[in-house]
Image (cartoon, helix red, strand yellow):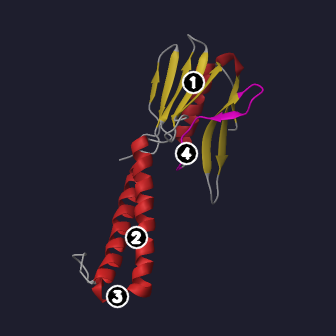
Amino acid sequence: MAVPIASQQASNLILRQSILGARRLSNYFWAAASTIGGVGFLLASLSSYFKINLLPFSDPTQLFFVPQGIAMGFYGVAGALLGLYLWLIIAWNVGGGYNEFNRETGTAKIFRWGFPGKNRQIEVTQPLEDVQAIRVEIREGLNPRRALYLRIKGKGDIPLTRVGQPIALSELENQGAELARFLAVPLEGL
């Protein structure tokens, strides 16, 4: 089952695209794997130090604490901290948000959730008359990139698609064409 990249709501005056942030299936998988692996290594390290078996599927009490137990403890702490970090960005939904283009108010609003703090909410609002074009970037190779950008007069390009795995070409073309049609601006890069 494919997970939608961005859901869209459109009317004659408002186009709203929801952007999936850190709450992707792959992040849940890696958070769980890191946590389980990190805790497993940490318990193996503690088992070798206290000579009490804390793992039900193996017997790490036979390991020497120096150097195997210390190394396993280091990897356990690193894995557990990585797992904690991944669970936190999933809980905070870092990168999630929406793109809203409103012809009624004449504004384009790009909203994303960031890390906690005074700048947790990242919001960029631009007048629609400053929008020059919708730019499509397609780069293949080792580090492929497929993204949509909002080209603003006198300013840089604002990214509209999520960070992470590349979007399918057909989906990227459809989103770009729909947005360019809605805003009545050219579509560049195809």
Q: Which residue is mark 4?
A: 163
Q: Nearer the viewer, mark 1 or mark 3?
A: 3
Examine the residues drawn in magenta and state their main secondary structure: loop
Label 2–label 1 contact, CB within 8 A:
no
- The span from disc 1 to disc 4 (Cα, nearest Å) is 18 Å
Distance of mark 4 from mark 3, alpha carbons? 43 Å
Task: Please report whichever mark, 1 or 3, sits nearer to the chain's N-terminal start.
Answer: 3
Name, please, the residue furthest toward the right.
154
- Above or below, 165 against 55 in this view is above
Residue on which the image places disc 2: 76
What label does residue 109 carry, if any?
1
Question: Mark 2: few, some, or many residues within 10 Å (few <14, many ≥20)?
Answer: many
Residue 187 appears in the figure: yes
Relative to 43, is 83 above or below? above
Marks 1/3: CA distance? 58 Å
Give SS at disc 3.
loop
Quadrant of the image for the C terminus? top right
Amino acid type, residue under disc 3 in the picture = Leu
Query: Is 17 displayed left or right of 48 in the figure?
Result: right
Residue 105 falls inside the magenta stretch: no
Q: Amino acid at mark 1?
A: Lys
Q: Position of residue 172 (x, y in %)?
A: 56, 39
Q: Residues within 10 Å of mark 3 (few under 14, many from 20)?
A: some
Secondary structure at badge 2 equals helix
